[in-house]
Amino acid sequence: MSVLLFKLRGVEEDEAEEVRALLSEHDIDFYETSNGRWGLGYAAVWLPDETKLEEAETLIAKYQQHRFEQARQSYIELCANGQQATMWQRFKTYPMQVVLAVMGIIIVGLFALTPFVFL
């Protein structure tokens, strides 16, 4: 019976491609399903059986840890060089998005707190 290995919803294409390459490198048979035309399907990487599930999960866990460490290091370097965007820089670049996001936060907060205020 098929086994779900890796969900692809919200995964960047480069990460999905690297996972496919990793599985192929280690001779792990897999197949992939997509969301389908209307996005109602289940995009994922599947194994045809459970024989190599543990090995595949271990490989993907190591890969994701390595990817996390690279992203973290990149973020630290950007912060050290002063290149990481601050809230003020984002406001200057995308003022409407920032204003709408803050308004949304305030509206959700009001809806959440209104029952407690009028008790």
Image (cartoon, grey):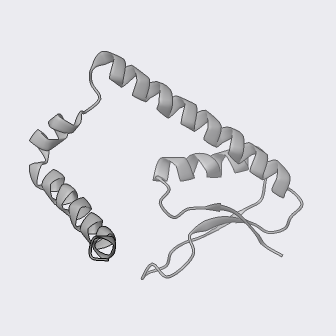
Residue 27 visible to the viewer:
no
Q: Residue at x 76, y 51 (%)?
A: 57
Quadrant in the rendering for residue 49: bottom right
Name the one closer to the observer, 29 or 97: 97
Q: Residue lying furthest top in this view?
A: 81
**Taking 85 as reference, is 2 above or below it?**
below
Q: Quadrant of the N terminus?
A: bottom right
Instruction: Judge left or right: residue 94 versus residue 101.
Output: left
Name the one closer to the observer, 64 or 36: 64
**Taking 98 as reference, is 1 above or below it?**
below
Q: Residue lying furthest front in this view?
A: 119
Q: Residue at x 50, y 56 (%)?
A: 11
**Taking 42 as reference, is 53 above or below it?**
above
Q: Residue lying furthest right in this view?
A: 51
Q: Quadrant of the C terminus?
A: bottom left
Q: Residue at x 27, y 76 (%)?
A: 118
How far from the left and from the top, in percent, is residue 79? Answer: 34, 23
How far from the left and from the top, in percent, is residue 20? Answer: 63, 52
How far from the left and from the top, in percent, is residue 74? Answer: 43, 27
Instruction: Judge left or right: residue 45 versus residue 108.
Output: right
How far from the left and from the top, in percent, is residue 103? Answer: 17, 61
